[in-house]
Image (cartoon, helix red, strand yellow):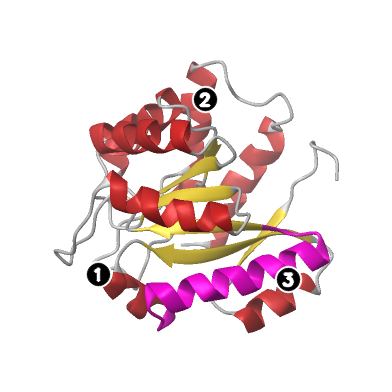
Amino acid sequence: SSSTTSQLLAFIANVRGAEEACRSEEIAYLGFPLSVSETFQQRNTRKSIQEALETVIHIQRLCSQHKKQQVVYLSMGFGNPYEEPYSPDIVAQLVEKLVAEGISIVALSDTIGVATPDTIQNLYTTLQPSFPTVTFGAHLHSPATSSKEKIQAAYEAGCRRFDGAIRGFGGCPMAKDELTGNIATETIVAVLEEKEALPTTFQKASFQEAWSYAAQVFY
């Protein structure tokens, strides 16, 4: 499809969801939540990390057959609230397994807002040189007060794929009791504009329209 056309991603948590998504021509990407934290993997998909990896492999086969691309979201990618072991090396070990299965897009994810500019910088600069075939994205939740500095840190560390939610709506109910909202898409747009890095295909007027309309949909 043309680079000026929006492409859809379906977020799925099991093979059945992947099969349904593969039947839809409009969907280009299938997103699967794989966790660096065993506790969160169970809470989110009722699987162990090993079982979830097997699901990723199955989904990857389906994607190959149906000309889709899988995006693996590495949740708890910057730490976890369960006091489980965490380090960039632990993340790298998981990425290594994904690369072996042909995964080429990995979204490093923080659904609880624990990432800091330093830990963001550290993780991207650790992973990117080791896995040159992988596009590392950023899926960050954050209080609005620290959103901008986190996006700047990821961008400066080489990240060029960002997830956002218009007006920062949403949160992850599986992560812990209180929700930390998604980083607002308009914050990401503002950072990229400042860095003169906003893609020329980005249609500002259309985005502004969607941003205004969102206020009526979510209230």
**Image coordinates for residue 49, horizontal then vertical, percent:** 39, 72
Position of 217 with respect to 154 (left or right) is right
Compare marks 2 and 3 and give the one earlier in the sequence.
3
Identify residue type, mark 2. Answer: Leu
Give the numbered dot on residue 71: none
Cα separation between marks 1 and 3:
32 Å
**Image coordinates for residue 3, horizontal then vertical, percent:** 79, 37
Q: Quadrant of residue 70?
A: bottom right
**Image coordinates for residue 72, horizontal then vertical, percent:** 53, 58
Identify residue type, mark 3. Answer: Leu
Identify residue type, mark 1. Answer: Lys
**Residue beneath label 3, please?**
62
Considering only vertical position in the picture, is 52 above or below 31? below
Q: Secondary structure at mark 1?
A: loop
Residue 169 can be seen, yes or no: no
Residue 106 can be seen, yes or no: yes
The span picked out in magenta is: 45-69
**Image coordinates for residue 118, horizontal then vertical, percent:** 24, 32
**Residue beneath label 1, please?**
176
Q: Secondary structure at mark 2?
A: helix
Q: Is residue 93 magenta?
A: no
> Relative to the observer, which residue lies in front, 49 or 7?
49
Q: Secondary structure at mark 3?
A: helix
Q: How many marks?
A: 3
Badge 1 crowding class, 10 Å Cα cut-off, few under 14, some 14 to 19, many 20 or more, is: some
Q: Nearer the viewer, mark 1 or mark 3?
A: 3
**Residue beneath label 2, please?**
192
Q: Residue at x 29, y 63 (%)?
A: 179
Compare marks 2 and 1 and give the one earlier in the sequence.
1
Badge 3 crowding class, 10 Å Cα cut-off, few under 14, some 14 to 19, many 20 or more, is: some
Q: Residue at x 54, y 66 (%)?
A: 32
